[in-house]
Amino acid sequence: MKPLTPVIQQDATGCGLAVIATLTGQPYAQIKTRAAELGIHPEDTRIWSDTDYVYRLAADQGLTLAPTPAPFNDWDCLPDLAIMAIKWRLIEGVPFWHWVVFQRADGQAQVLDSGIRLKHHRRSDLWRIQPKWFIEVRS
């Protein structure tokens, strides 16, 4: 599998859009425009707490995801390509997380993190990342 190029989110809550842009190789702005046509807006903070919009946008872009998220147990047990929930936390009883892409390419495991404040978006410091669960990307 060829290494993907991380796409940087342009909105505070745009990590899910950036994940889809990374997986499809499209610019963030293009995915944001299509998401808006589907009623998905990064200003809506509910997208930090719901998997539905990522499933809808992925399907719209021709990606096939596992039907349900799976709990994270170990880096070696991950599929070669997955969307991961990291920085998972509860705020007033509501779960929030940050979306990233996990990819194993050329024998190297890495996390592609769209966070705008990061200096390096291709991360290999897996011991620092604490995933809660993942969604396998099947196509």
Image (tube, grey):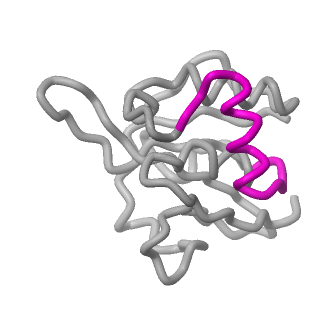
Q: Which residue is drawn at 65% across and 43% down?
A: 82
- Give the camera-side residue of 10 and 70: 10
Answer with left or right where residue 81 lies relative to residue 60: left
In the picture shown, does residue 81 fall above or below 49? below
- Give residue 50's position: percent from left, percent from top: 45, 24
Residue 71 in the image, given as x and y percentages of width and height:
44, 30
Point out residue 47 in the picture as x, y percentages from the top left corner.
46, 31
Left or right of residue 84, residue 48 in this image: left
Q: Is residue 53 magenta?
A: no
Q: Tell me which corner region of the image, top left, top right, bottom left or bottom right, holds residue 110.
A: bottom right
Magenta span dominant secondary structure: helix
Q: Nearer the viewer, residue 95 or 31?
A: 31
Q: Height in image: 102 above or below 68?
A: below
Q: Does the magenta stretch include residue 34?
A: yes
Question: Residues in magenta?
Answer: 23-41
Q: Which of 67 and 58 is in front in this view?
A: 58
In this picture, residue 32 sits left or right of residue 118 = right
- On the image, the x and y values in percent for residue 55 come to 65, 24
Query: Residue at horizontal 38%, vertical 34%?
Result: 45
